Image: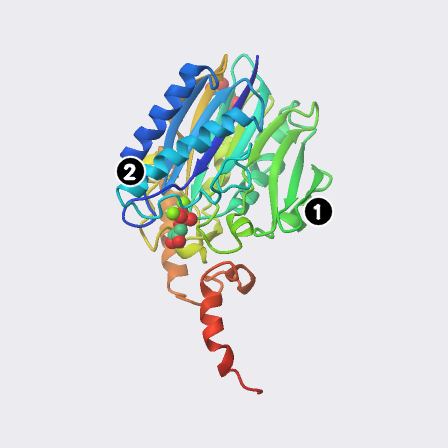
Amino acid sequence: MRTTISVIKADVGSLAGHHIVPDQLLDIARRSLEEERKKGIIEDFYVTSVGDDLQLIMTHRRGEDNKEVHEIAWNTFKRAAEAAKDTGLYGAGQDLLKDTFSGNVKGMGPGVAEMEIEERPSEPFVVFMADKTSPGAFNLPIFRIFADPFNTAGLVIDPSLHSGFTFEVMDVIEGTVVELNAPEEIYDILALIGTLGRYIIRKVRRRSDGQIAAVMSTTRLNLIAGRYVGKDDPVAIVRAQHGFPALGEILEPFSLPHLVPGWMRGSHYGPLMPVGIKDARPTRFDGPPRIAALGFVVHNSRLVGPSDLFSDVAFDEARRMAGMIADYMRRHGPFMPHRIEQEEMEYTTLPGIMEKLKGRFKPA
Ligand code: 13P
Ligand code: 13P
Ligand code: MG
Ligand code: MG
């Protein structure tokens, strides 16, 4: 059975700032997708939120980049954004950057991760959803899952993983993509993906048969809008078990709350804190950045689950560490490297301040 998993998300409005999608909007999205499911365009769906981002997790048999499926997502976001506007929610329609749908939500604001797969007898997968950060946030954990033998035991001891994975890395500034193989080219991969704002892992495939293993959303809203409109809080889909990394190998890298750009006004580095869905409401300095993970299996295109994976107490220590790192970083106030670098600030509101000071610079 060929099934497509489509995760499409957008910030269409939040309560009292940028931290939570009110139930009212989740209900609108659920009703909207239920109608579409009855029409038979999608087979199944799950609606949730992480921070101020509304997440539509859908299954269908129409392949990636399907116009009808994307249109369903777009219309659902539009309906929720209308309601957000009507009730005066904050940032209503924030990520809907275009007026009319033109066949694909890519480039219109929402973030998209999709994979078409041949279902295995059991098809476990994880949907990762982050808030207050950007797509490069997945570079480090995805590298560790698929290329670091100190993280993923299966790379060493499971013959079906031993031949490694191919990384598709996108240059979001140039709009180009390069394929690199692990393990031989891991130094080349790392030479690129350490630059979080520019080189982003978009896909990972298993080398033995080319099967898709992971997909990440790569939208950069500021590159579409040319100004700061909120961060491109990313999503990812990762397949688990039986020829892919085990679930625990997929979650393990998130035990380190690594530093990612985002947080307050999309302008600060902070630790990525792994949390259960109920704790995905970033209020401390609009953060620290959060990541939630839901585990599903898909069978005959129907979703079973989810399990809220970071609600495990074993991630308490990571959350505590994230809290300590947040304290440390915050004490730097407006100083780098807490505040993001100048080039990235060009997409924020800082140029307005620079403009004001321009005439006051005199030859030194
Ligand atoms: P089970 O024996 O519980 O299926 O676990 C196998 C495994 O690979 C755990 O990582
Ligand atoms: P979002 O990108 O999640 O909307 O957050 C925007 C922001 O400015 C937070 O301080
Ligand atoms: Mg927002
Ligand atoms: Mg957000």
Q: Is residue 311 above or below residue 243?
A: below
Q: Secondary structure at mark 1?
A: helix
In the orientation shown, which residue stands out farthest toward the right? 184
> Circle 1 is placed at which residue position?
188
Q: Secondary structure at mark 2?
A: loop
Say left or right for 182 vs 252: right
Residue 85 appears in which quarter of the rendering?
A: top left
Image spot of residue 27 (x, y percent): 30, 29
Q: Considering only order in the chain, which callout, 2 or 1, is on the residue closer to the N terminus?
A: 2
How far is mark 1 from mark 2, CA to CA? 43 Å
> Foreground residue, 286 or 154?
286
Image spot of residue 340 (x, y percent): 49, 60
State the residue at coordinates (42%, 20%): 36
Image spot of residue 72 (x, y percent): 46, 27
Q: Which mark is residue 82?
A: none
Say left or right for 357 vs 281: right
Say left or right for 180 vs 98: right
User: Of the residues tagged 1 and 2, which is closer to the observer?
Assistant: 2
> Circle 2 is placed at which residue position?
22
Identify residue type, mark 1.
Answer: Asp
Q: In the rendered image, which quarter contains the N terminus?
A: top right
Identify residue type, mark 2.
Answer: Pro
> Foreground residue, 357 or 312?
357
Around disc 1, counting alpha carbons within 10 Å, would you say few (fewer than 14), some (14 to 19), or many (20 or more)? few
Report if residue 122 is visible in the image: yes
